[in-house]
Amino acid sequence: MLVVIIVLLALALGFAWLKIGSHRQAVQALEQAIFRKQPLLSEDLPGSAGTAWERLRRVSNEFISEFNQLQQQRTGQLAQLEATLGSLQEGVLIVDANNTILLANKAIQAISPRPAHQIIGHRLELVLHSATFLTYVEAVRRGRAQPQQEVEFIEAGRTTWLEVTGSTIQNQAQSRSLWTIFVLHDITKQKKLEAVRKDFVANVSHELRTPLSVIKGYVETLVDGHGEIPADDRERFLKTIQRHTERLNSLLEDLLVLSRLESINPGLKREVVDLPGLLAVIIEDYQARPAAAGHRLELSAEAVPALGAVNLDPLKFSQVVENLLDNALKYTPKGSRIELAARVLNADDVVVSLGDNGPGIPAEDLPHLFERFYRVDKGRSRETGGTGLGLSIVKHIVQLHGGRVWVESELGKGTTFSFSVPLRVGGK
Ligand code: ADP
């Protein structure tokens, strides 16, 4: 009897041992399938595993396939997000609670010394050097920031102005960790334009103030003095008022011309023009003027016949030559020689130059000559009715024609202003 019991026990133990072995094999197969994220096949399970394992295999396979699908979706979304952020003009930056950069798109390169992918994982303060920005980051994190903040970044001597908008985002994985996202919009161009506009308004006010205060002063004297002012003085006062009124008038006229030239539709009326003929008419007209009586005005005819017809706006073109001629007459002493010349350059452009043998212009003034209101000798310019806008108008008209303007000058020897216009003969 005992022997039978022992045999039965041994058989039961052997059977249990076999079962445990097959379960261990099944667990290993399931582990491998989950690890590789590949479905578990029936043949991977030992034959003795049983129906419960078959059910577990099917459920596990459903999980694995669902996981693979989600993984694919996530990769696709990430690639899409990366492409979208990469193509944005605005910089996008995400930092964690310790100011470590988690995400930076390509546009961040405008202010960062290193490419975006090289700054991820680094601390913000070591990458972007702006105390204002770092203070804003802290304020956003504490929920005490303005909706937007203008920040100036100076990197490698280059200044960039950005309008920064920041907001906090809750990190889904670690609910207590707060991330902050920033969108950085480049406003450098607007800032520069704003500075130009402010400068311009200040300059115009300054230019208007002098003649207006002179006119006001003399008018008051005339009104207060009634009939007591001697006729000679009255005449002198009225002439001064007239001179300053004329100055105001030319200033306004030049400002209007400039504003029209800078408008969206500057009204360029191109036509095919006989350039040598046009230059000859301008020179003839000036030679007859009393202002040119003491000067020698010449037209260099050398290359002119080769020019033929050029496609340009004759009125505006004439204004360029006339402004340069007026200056040459104003800023050179009597007896000076003024020469208008034209030649074809590289078969593409016609270059017109106006040279004089006057006093010349100091080298340090040359780069600024075409700026509005820039004058070398302020007194002389005002005395001769100059507005400081003539060369600015010249530059605008030449640029509208697709050309460029430049100046060469040597003190004591003279000055030559030149401008080019593309030579498009025949068509409009
Ligand atoms: P303005 O109304 O004062 O003449 P412009 O813009 O025409 O203004 O000229 C700017 C300045 O350039 C002048 O004030 C003058 O100092 C200088 N300039 C222009 N042309 C000559 C020239 N041919 N010789 C010497 N200086 C000149």
Image: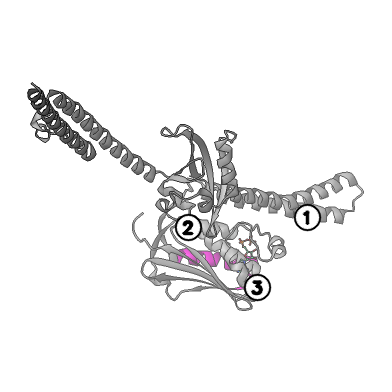
How far is disc 3 from disc 1 in space, using C-alphas? 26 Å
> Number of callouts in the render?
3
Residue 403 is situated, as x and y percent measured from the top left of the image, at 45, 61
Q: Quadrant of residue 79?
A: top left
Q: Residues within 10 Å of mark 2 (few under 14, many from 20)?
A: some
Circle 3 is placed at which residue position?
294
Residue 8 is situated, as x and y percent measured from the top left of the image, at 9, 24
* N-terminal-most mark, 3 or 2: 3
| Left or right side of 103 for 382 | right
Circle 1 is placed at which residue position?
240
| Circle 3 SS class | loop
Asked whether disc 3 touches disc 2, contact meaning CB atoms under 8 Å apart, the reply is no
Q: Residues within 10 Å of mark 1 (few under 14, many from 20)?
A: some
Along the line of sight, which residue is nearer the eye, 282 or 339? 339
Residue 173 is situated, as x and y percent measured from the top left of the image, at 41, 34
Along the line of sight, which residue is nearer the eye, 60 or 319? 60
Asked whether disc 3 touches disc 1, contact meaning CB atoms under 8 Å apart, the reply is no
Q: Nearer the viewer, mark 1 or mark 2?
A: 2
Q: Which amino acid, mark 2? A: Gln
Q: Quadrant of residue 355?
A: bottom right
Magenta residues, start to end: 276-296
Circle 2 is placed at which residue position?
399
